[in-house]
Image (cartoon, rainbow, N blue to C red):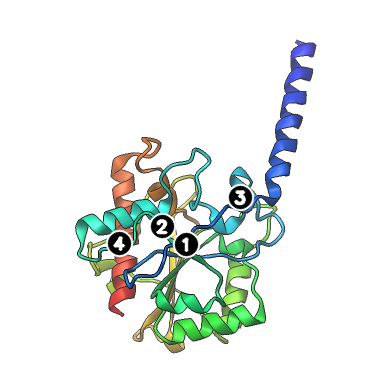
Amino acid sequence: MAAGLLFMLAALASAGQRFLRLGEFEPPVRNAQYDGRFAFARIRYAPAPGGYQYCGLPSWAHGYLSCQGGVRAETSLMQIMNEISLLNPQIEESMVLSLDDPTLEKYPIAYMVEAGYWTLTDQEAAAFRAYLLKGGFAIFDDFRDNPGEREAWDNFESNMRRVIPGARFLDLAMSHPVFDSFFRIPSLDIIPQSYDLGRPIIRGLFEGNDPTRRLLAIANYNTDVSDFWEFSATGFRPIEESNEAYKLGVNYIMYGLLH
């Protein structure tokens, strides 16, 4: 038994070393060539310490690549958008852009994951401010406060206040049009939880902090909606739960395009 335990410890140590060697792994990016069609635009940023976790990927890339390979979160969502609407989006390739990339202005909706590890330069803050105020819409997903780790929401909100001085996120009421822009979503209770504890929290940032004006950004906090997009075709997540997660993504895109 002692020999077996030592062998297991050695194996775990070896696995840990392999994981650490992957800590600097940056996934290859192949952006779609712009052709006027809608494309999913994922925001790339320099992760804060601790941001290399899942498969050794940087925090911005969670869902962009799967440990098992195959379909990515955005590919799955764009396939759904293509089937239920006339949007005719780019499906096979998405866009991965930094906030200060001028190409971002060609894409009305920007998406970011793990905003608790998001670091921001002054140049990026200014460019993101211009993007949002010109009509861009931002979706933030897959972040939460983990005990003993950095305060994810505080970091995210601090960055957004550099982008929009005085920015204040408000908990969204289910009567907001974003929950009725395509599918009717009556309650947050239908939103599945992949591994987060408690209920998801959905907050919004409005122009001038006025909830009667345009929604500039929406944040899925204490939840990982895109986890269901990523694994929906693998059998790893129940179909019924994946469908509810897709409804939220579809509504966000429809709202962003119409507002």
Q: How many marks?
A: 4
Q: Earlier in the sequence, mark 2 or mark 4?
A: 2
x 29%, y 49%: residue: 243
Nearest-to-viewer mark from 1 and 4: 1
Secondary structure under tag 3 reads loop
Q: Residues within 10 Å of mark 3 (few under 14, many from 20)?
A: many
Q: Nearer the viewer, residue 172 or 137?
A: 137
x 59%, y 69%: residue: 156
Task: Quote the CA–CA distance across marks 3 and 1.
Answer: 18 Å
Q: Are marks 3 and 2 in contact (CB under 8 Å)?
A: no
Picture quadrant where residue 119 is located: bottom right
Q: Earlier in the sequence, mark 3 or mark 2?
A: 3
x 34%, y 39%: residue: 238
Secondary structure under tag 1 reads loop
- Residue position marked by numbered label 4 in the rendering: 250
Amino acid on which the number 2 mark rests in the picture? Glu
- Residue position marked by numbered label 2 in the rendering: 93
Q: Earlier in the sequence, mark 3 or mark 1?
A: 1
Image height of 176 relative to 64, above or below: below
Q: Which mark is residue 31?
A: 1
Q: Seen in the image, is 93 located left or right of residue 152?
A: left
Q: Earlier in the sequence, mark 1 or mark 4?
A: 1
Q: Residues within 10 Å of mark 1 (few under 14, many from 20)?
A: some
Report x, y in % for residue 25: 65, 50
Q: Are marks 2 and 4 in contact (CB under 8 Å)?
A: no
On-image quarter of the N terminus? top right
Q: Are marks 1 and 4 in contact (CB under 8 Å)?
A: no
Q: Earlier in the sequence, mark 4 or mark 3?
A: 3
Q: Residues within 10 Å of mark 4 (few under 14, many from 20)?
A: many
Amino acid on which the number 1 mark rests in the picture? Asn
